[in-house]
Amino acid sequence: MRILHTMLRVGDLDRSIRFYTEVLGMKLLSRRDYPDGKFTLAFLGFDERVGGKQVGGAELELTYNWGVDRYELGNAYGHIAIEVDDAARACAEVKARGGKVTREAGPMKHGTTVIAFVEDPDGYKIEFIEKGVRE
């Protein structure tokens, strides 16, 4: 078994695709409308697909339900985690691309693993975890 994807509902699909591709550097792997269900799915990731099939790491599924422009995030959702070489540099790149950093890079509370947090246009948190020893 392996994790295939995480799904997020978004209020503006094009805005979210721009964030994940232009700010975080993911690739748009597929996008498909489902007119009968009135929704669109977009899959993004850092790895490629071969013959339309997932071959690398986990993907992010963005779901846009037509006519819904906002969701309440609730308090059960945590975050998506992305490994980066240098968390401070990743934060600087996010800022330079117009993204929002909500916690600058630094050691985690009560530990030494270097982390940072950014936020996507819908308010979802993304954690950067710097490569190295994790606690």
Image (tube, rainbow, N blue to C red):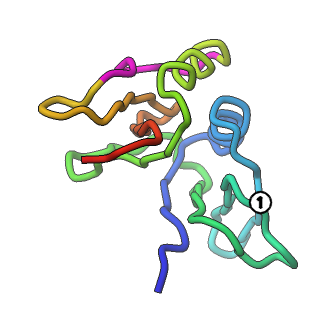
Q: Is residue 12 left or right of residue 130?
A: right
Residue beneath disc 1: 29
Q: Amino acid at mark 1?
A: Leu
Q: Residue at x 64, y 33 (%)?
A: 19
* Spot occupied by residue 59 in the image (x, y as percentages of width and height): 60, 62
* Spot occupied by residue 118 in the image (x, y as percentages of width and height): 45, 28
Does residue 126 lie above or below 28 as drawn?
above
Quarter-of-image position of residue 123: top left
Residue closest to the far bottom: 1
Quarter-of-image position of residue 56: bottom right
- Nearer-the-camera pick, 30 or 83: 83
Does residue 115 lie above or below 91 as drawn?
below
Instruction: Please report the bounds of the magenta region as a residue range.
Output: 98-106
* Spot occupied by residue 132 in the image (x, y as percentages of width and height): 42, 42
Neighbours of disc 1 within 10 Å: few (<14), some (14-19), many (20+): some
Quarter-of-image position of residue 105: top left
- Nearer-the-camera pick, 37 or 23: 23
Residue closest to the far right: 51
Q: Residue at x 33, y 21 (%)?
A: 106
Q: Is residue 72 left or right of residue 128?
A: left
Q: Is residue 27 magenta?
A: no
